[in-house]
Image (cartoon, rainbow, N blue to C red):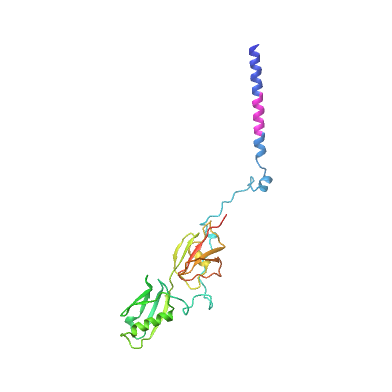
Amino acid sequence: MPNRDRVENMSNNITKFIRLAAILLAATLSFAPCPAMAQDIGLPGPSQQVRPAPSATDPSALPKYTAPVPVAPGEGITDEHYRLGISDKLKITVYGEDDLSGEFVVDSTGQIQLPLVGQVKAANLTLHEFKAEVVAALSDGYLKDPKVSVEVLNYRPFYIMGEVNKPGEYPYENGLTVLSAIALAGGYTYRANDDKVYVRHNGESQEHTMPADSKTKILPGDIVRVPERIF
């Protein structure tokens, strides 16, 4: 009889195991969403494909670069009010004196090294003020009543940092906007806040919050920072 009891116990255990397996299988099948349910909860159904998230290097996701257009008076840089700074490149013409004329760059000390007269201050001066400095230097024992003209050939570069693909220094073009600057820097990263930028003008210590649109102008020497968006 002990053998009969052992067989019955074994049979009961097998029956319980089969029932438990059936319960687990039913629970697993009931968890799988049907196509309609998959759409309701945002999961792909059997015939749907999951689209990958857009890549930060996808050219279609980057703003297109548009060359700066001519700027109406008061909107861009006018040489009358523009103040010279380090890395500005000037064309200086001394009429009748080809050896004293040429193209010159404002050096790291804010001065320009001119033939014959040596260093002349340029940084933070308007073109009119700098021209007067050159005339005064040439009149001091070198030329009688010198005639001088000065024009900006290349403005000093601007800088862009933060959430752009290629941060760094870039040549300035008159009429440059925030969007053009971002495009020059390879466009936004996937973390970028594309609603605003922070701009620090040359010679200032504080940033200004500005909208990231085609109406926001960038000036020579500006430091543009694209912030990270808050998720």
Residue at the extreme front: 205
Which one is nearer the viewer's eye here, 7 or 136? Answer: 136
Which residue is at 65% across, 32% downward? 24
Counting from the top left corner in percent of width and height, residue 15 is at 66, 24
Which residue is at 65% across, 29% downward? 20
Q: Could you tell whether 150 is left or right of 65 in the image?
A: left
Which residue is at 65% across, 19% downward? 9
Which residue is at 66% across, 48% downward? 39
Q: Could you tell whether 150 is left or right of 207 in the image?
A: left
Counting from the top left corner in percent of width and height, residue 123 is at 41, 74
Q: Main secondary structure of the magenta part?
A: helix
Which one is nearer the viewer's eye here, 90 or 205? Answer: 205
Rendered view: 53 above or below 167: above
Residue at the extreme bottom: 144
Q: Could you tell whether 193 is left or right of 119 in the image?
A: right
Q: Which residues are magenta?
A: 15-25
The C terminus, quarter of image: bottom right
The N terminus, quarter of image: top right
- Tell whether position 132 is magenta: no
Residue at the extreme top: 1
Rendered view: 26 above or below 100: above
Rendered view: 89 above or below 34: below
Q: How many marks?
A: 0
Counting from the top left corner in percent of width and height, residue 19 is at 67, 28
Which one is nearer the viewer's eye here, 35 or 41? Answer: 41
Q: Quadrant of residue 97?
A: bottom left
